[in-house]
Image (tube, rainbow, N blue to C red):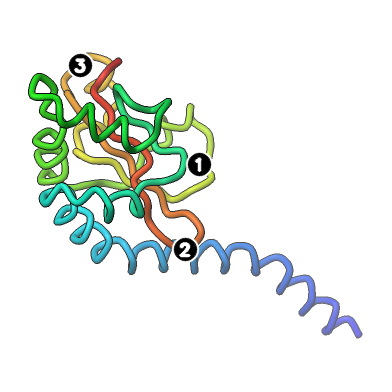
Amino acid sequence: MKLSRLSIFLVLLLAPSAVGANEKLDAQRAWKPFFESFRATVRKRDRAALRGMLSTDFFSSGGNSEGAEAAFQFWDDPQVRGWDAFNRVLAQGTVAKAAWWNAGGKSKYIGRVAPPAANIRRNVKRGAVHWYAIFEFRDGRWYCTVFNQCCD
């Protein structure tokens, strides 16, 4: 009887970390194909495909209140050149999102940030990064959640 109680206790203790580990592994496996596809979609300015890669709460400079369409219009502005900025940011790659993006707390989602320089708080605060993108792994797939001019 003691052995079975001990077994149950160990399963309950270790199960949450196993689930978290599976999610991290799933996120790692899904990242490269997603990011390659995402970069190609932005390069082609394929709005229909991009809509499916943006989170429902997607935030972008100049267009958050009206969703993706307002963001697309903002990026189209010749003064903004948002599509070009998006391509430049994505070309620099990504890194795992630092805790400071969540006010030091644990994020609800696994995340990545582009460009890598945007993951250093002082670069963002000092305006050394002009644009940044944030990606999150939600419900088993990656989404772009933010593409923002720094720092408005």
Q: 139 or 2, which lies in front?
A: 139
Which is more N-terminal, label 2 or label 3?
A: 3
Which of the labelled discs sits on residue 140, or is there none?
2
**Residue 90 point in image, percent of width and height:** 16, 44
Which is more N-terminal, label 3 or label 1?
A: 1
Three-letter amino acid code at the position of disc 3: Gly
The answer to whether residue 71 is above or below residue 106 is above
Residue found at x 83% / y 84% = 3
Label 2 environment density (alpha carbons within 10 Å; few <14, some 14–19, many ≥20): few
Residue found at x 38% / y 41% = 145
Which of the labelled discs sits on residue 127, or is there none?
3
Which of the labelled discs sits on residue 119, or is there none?
none
Q: 63 or 5, which lies in front?
A: 63
Image position of 80 (left or right of 8): left
The answer to whether residue 29 is above or below residue 3 is above
Label 3 environment density (alpha carbons within 10 Å; few <14, some 14–19, many ≥20): some
Three-letter amino acid code at the position of disc 1: Ser
**Residue 142 point in image, percent of width and height:** 37, 56
Quadrant hosting residue 108 = top right
CB atoms of marks 1 and 2 within 8 Å:
no
Cα separation, mark 3 vs mark 2, equals 33 Å
Three-letter amino acid code at the position of disc 2: Gly
Please, what secondary structure does the residue beneath circle 3 have? loop
Tag nearer the camera, 1 or 2: 2
- Quarter in which the C terminus is drawn: top left
The answer to whether residue 24 is above or below residue 111 is below
Residue found at x 23% / y 40% = 114
- Quarter in which the N terminus is drawn: bottom right
Q: Which residue is mark 1?
A: 107
